Amino acid sequence: MIRMPSLYGIDEDQISTDSHLVQHRADLVHTAAMLLSKAGMIKYDRRTGALQPNVIGKVASHYYIKHNSMSVYNENMKP
């Protein structure tokens, strides 16, 4: 990311304020955690940043099932 920031959609202003892109990487992790949490694959505590996988999330990761597919599965399996 630091070598070719334009490839990842990172502006020069962002590099000048955060040379190691710590905030950008934290934003990426937060976004991914929110998506997985909404799909029911993990439990995500926003305050502490703790991630805890669910059984469904473990099975989905073993079979390379994406969060979109798990969202559809969870939506259709409701009683």
Image: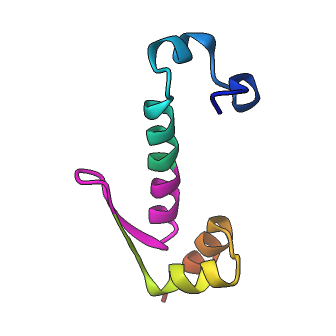
From where the camera sits, is residue 78 visible? no
Drawn side of residue 72 relative to residue 44, left or right: right
Q: Nearer the viewer, residue 22 or 52?
A: 22
Indicate whether residue 40 is drawn in magenta. Answer: yes
Is 30 rendered above or below residue 66?
above
Q: Residue at x 23, y 50 (%)?
A: 47
Is 25 rendered above or below residue 74?
above
Image x and y of residue 68, in percent = 66, 65
Drawn side of residue 60 relative to residue 55, left or right: right
* Residue 62 occupies quadrant: bottom right
From where the camera sits, is residue 44 visible? yes
Q: How many marks?
A: 0
Q: In the rendered structure, which segment of residues is drawn in magenta?
A: 32-50
Q: Nearer the viewer, residue 62 or 1?
A: 1
Q: Where's the N terminus, which quadrant?
A: top right
Drawn side of residue 35 relative to residue 52, left or right: right
Image x and y of residue 17, in percent = 45, 14
Q: Residue at x 63, y 16 (%)?
A: 11
- Residue closest to the far right: 7
Colour basis: rainbow
Is 24 rendered above or below residue 40?
above
Indicate whether residue 65 is drawn in magenta. Answer: no
Image x and y of residue 10, in percent = 63, 23
Q: Nearer the viewer, residue 20 or 38?
A: 20
Image x and y of residue 60, in percent = 61, 80
Q: Nearer the viewer, residue 51 or 68?
A: 51
